[in-house]
Amino acid sequence: MARSLLPCLLLFVSAQTIFSSAVFELKINSFTSARSVCQFQTQDCQIFFRVCLKHSQDSQDDTKPEPPCTYGIAFTEIFGADPKSISASAPVKVDISFKWPETFALIIEAWNAESSGLDSTENQNNLISRLATRHRLRVGEDWSQGVQFGNQSELNYSYHLVCNEYYHGNACSSYCRPRNDTFGHYTCDDNGGRRCLGGWTGVYCSHPICAAGCSKDHGLCESPGECVCRQGWQGERCDECARHPGCIHGTCLQPWQCNCREGWGGLYCDQDLNYCTNHKPCKNDASCTNTGQGSYTCTCRPGFTSKNCEIETNECDSNPCKNGGSCKDLENDYSCECPQGFYGKNCEISAMTCADGPCFNGGTCTESVVGGYSCRCPSGYTGSNCEKRIDKCSSNPCANGAQCLDLGKRIMCRCRAGFTGSRCETNIDDCASNPCFNAGTCVDGINDFTCTCTLGFTSKDCAMRISSCDHPCHNGGACYTHFTGPVCKCPLGFMGARCEYPVPMATTKPSGNPDGPSALIAAVALGLVTLTLLVFAAIHILRQLRRGRKLTGMTTSVKNNLETANNRNTLVSGGGSYNGSLPGAPLCSLREKEAFLIPGGQLKVSNKDAALVENGGDNNAIFKNQMADCNLARDEQRMARNKFDPKKCDSSVIVPPLSFSKDGLYHPVFIIPEEMEHCVFATEV
């Protein structure tokens, strides 16, 4: 049963090791026993120790091996029983996974190791000695020394209890892991308390300490020493409210306010309600009056003028002093310093008389009744004493910058180049001589002209021929002269007025020419139309040829039939059984045949009905033609006038049958003209 409980005990020890907060370490320094350590082994005697930690009780039960070791159990390694091997053995460790109580019971057993190793504890005969004691131990790195005396044995050992990493305190029960990340910024003290790094605060040291003076209500920070203002607040310490956007002369107590300062109004405090106070626009002690909406009015003191009263009025500008007196401007006044012989506010009163000869340049002196005198000046002079000569050029009589010469009784204008006239008022027409050649347009200037040349000419007078095609076309374009200027014919792949731009290529381009399908369709359609026209022309030509052949055949047939009808075939050929005539038929001349055959002859064809009587045999087919209506009424009258004697010709004319179809619609009747022998041949077709 002990064997089956050992794996469970080892699993429990492993679990305690994983979650342990402290480690109890014990080292065997020496072990001696009066009993023989190896009773059954003479060579290679080996031993090991088992350490048992239990909770401490007042009774003696805690020194017994039962119940099991509640705090933990550990085994040393197996080593030799000699003192050197015992003192050199490694410390044994017991993991503590609970709050260390400081008091405990310690049981140390010495076992003789058999070949089965640690399983030797199942055989109680292998037990060498068992030593039990109670101890009080605090957490620390220092080793405590212990000596146990048992039944004829002595054991020297050292022991201590140290906390595992991240565990702190007297009982190793405080867990604290230093960190510097999003979840905290701190280290740990000896008692397991968190000690925040510089600039951080809070339970887990996760809150940064903002800059000194940063408003707690209106500022925040994400890193130590920062001061980030919340919306609506500003300033280095986030203690200033943000005014409404666009607020100019206003303040705020809360964000987005715009409280206007004194003298300002409007939604954005941009309307100056006290312009006089804020700007003081009036100068020279003038009084200012606000008129609202940023406007004002200045009331100037005497002697000043303009909108802001900044211009001082000069009373001397009106030349108030007479008779050569000098004027001195005063504030809103003036004074005249009169020459000798004159006095008064404006030096208008003279103390001289005509006897003193005050008039110059031949002026006539007249004494006044109230005192003083006056001078009547001759032409060309002025002034109170006729002392000033009138300058006739002072009125600028000469135009266009001409120089004026005062010659006394008249003036003379010396004109600038390009002008003429008594006052130089006329611009000389420089285009009168037609200075522009080759149909150039002349524009008159001042002592100059400008020619607007036609295409292909240049220079001052358009006398020089130029070519408008002096390298105006780029990328190998061909230049042509046009009345509007040069015209460029661009090569393939370029465009623009000067062939300066490349033709943009299509993003998706099929193989070959992109216009190939449309051009091919157009070519096929044109070919089909041409072929159709040729076919129709050929058909028309064949029909014309066939019609010509048919007409030729009909002409030949009619010709042969006429010969047969007039019985002239034998006459011409001179052969036949009838020698060219039929019995009872009169001999006709060759002229009759020719009359039938000559186109446009005097032979007439009539479609009048004829009564044909067939008489004859096989060899001699004799047709007796009885005339129902031999000819037209006109022909009958002509025959009567000519005393046509039917006896001259047999009433029955024997005519061989013609080749015309009897089923035809018309039955031609051939009539011999008057100058021939009057014989009527009627044939049935």
Image: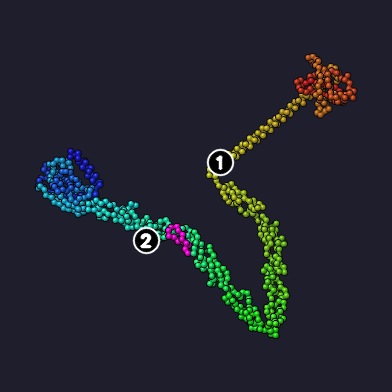
Q: How crowded is mark 2: few (under 14 residues within 10 Å), some or many (20 or more)?
A: few
Q: Per the image, is 253 magenta?
A: yes
Percent of width and height locating residue 301: 56, 72
Percent of width and height locating residue 564: 80, 21
Secondary structure under the numbered disc 2 in the rendered image: loop
Task: Using the image, determine if residue 436 lies above or below residue 411.
Answer: above
**Of 332 and 413, the residue lying toward us:** 332
Q: Give the range drawn in magenta.
A: 249-262
Compared across the picture, whether 368 is left or right of 208 comes to: right
Amino acid type at mark 2: Gly
Q: Residue at x 68, y 78 (%)?
A: 383
How many numbered discs, if any? 2
**Of 123 and 531, the residue lying toward us:** 123
Compared across the picture, whether 611 is left or right of 73 comes to: right
Given the current orientation, which residue lies at the most extreme top position?
617
Task: Using the image, determine if residue 185 lies above or below residue 533.
Answer: below
**Of 584 and 505, the residue lying toward us:** 505
Locate the N terminus by quadrant: top left
Secondary structure under the numbered disc 1 in the rendered image: loop
Q: Which mark is residue 213?
A: 2
Compared across the picture, whether 463 is left or right of 510 comes to: right
Given the current orientation, which residue lies at the most extreme bottom position?
355
List the residue tagged with mark 1.
Answer: 512
Question: Distance between the Cα atoms at labels 2 and 1?
Answer: 79 Å
Percent of width and height locating residue 493: 57, 47
Residue 574 in sight: no
**Which of disc 1 and disc 2 is earlier in sequence?**
2
